[in-house]
Amino acid sequence: DGSKETDERIKRVFKADRGIGVIRHADAGYEEAIDLVKNSDLKAPMIR
């Protein structure tokens, strides 16, 4: 609808979708994904 709220919702959806994929790969043990989680603002309590 062109509102600022819609723009913000779209940004959150696309960031969340990518983040979930990275977290799933990190949880599966992929080193590249683990490094990305550790060096980003993603919250993944299972990755330390």
Image (cartoon, rainbow, N blue to C red):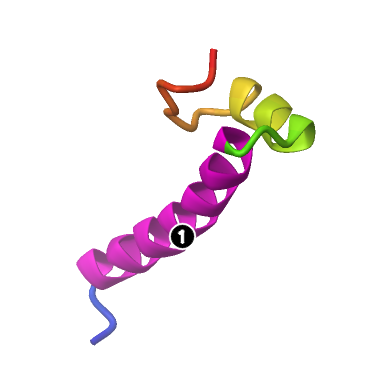
User: In this view of the protein, which residue sits in the foreground, 30 or 4?
Assistant: 30
Residue 47 vertical position relative to residue 27 in the rendered view, above or below = above
Looking at this rendering, what residue extends furthest in the bottom direction?
1
Closest to the observer: 6 or 36? 36
Q: Residue at x 51, y 48 (%)?
A: 19
Quadrant of the frame with the N terminus:
bottom left
Nearer to us in this view, 30 or 10:
30
Left or right: 40 with respect to 36?
Answer: left
Q: Quadrant of residue 13?
A: bottom left
Magenta span covers which residues?
A: 4-27
Q: Position of residue 42 (x, y in %)?
A: 48, 32
Q: Where does the image place residue 12, in percent across and percent down from the top left?
A: 36, 56
Question: Residue 17: percent from the left, percent from the top?
Answer: 46, 60
Q: Reply yes or no: does residue 31 show up in magenta.
A: no
Q: Is residue 19 magenta?
A: yes
In this rendering, would 1 be left or right of 7? left
Most distant residue in the right direction: 32
Magenta stretch, main secondary structure, is: helix
Quadrant in the rendering for residue 3: bottom left
Name the residue: 67% across, 28% down.
34
Q: Which residue bears the numbered disc 1?
A: 17
Q: Is residue 4 left or right of residue 25?
A: left
Task: Tell me the amino acid under the disc marked 1.
Answer: Asp
How would you rate the neighbour count of disc 1 (Cα within 10 Å): few for under 14, some for 14-19, many for 20 or more? Answer: few
Residue ID at (55%, 53%):
21
Q: In the orientation shown, which residue stands out farthest toward the top? A: 48
Disc tally is: 1
Residue at point 21%, 65% (across, down): 5
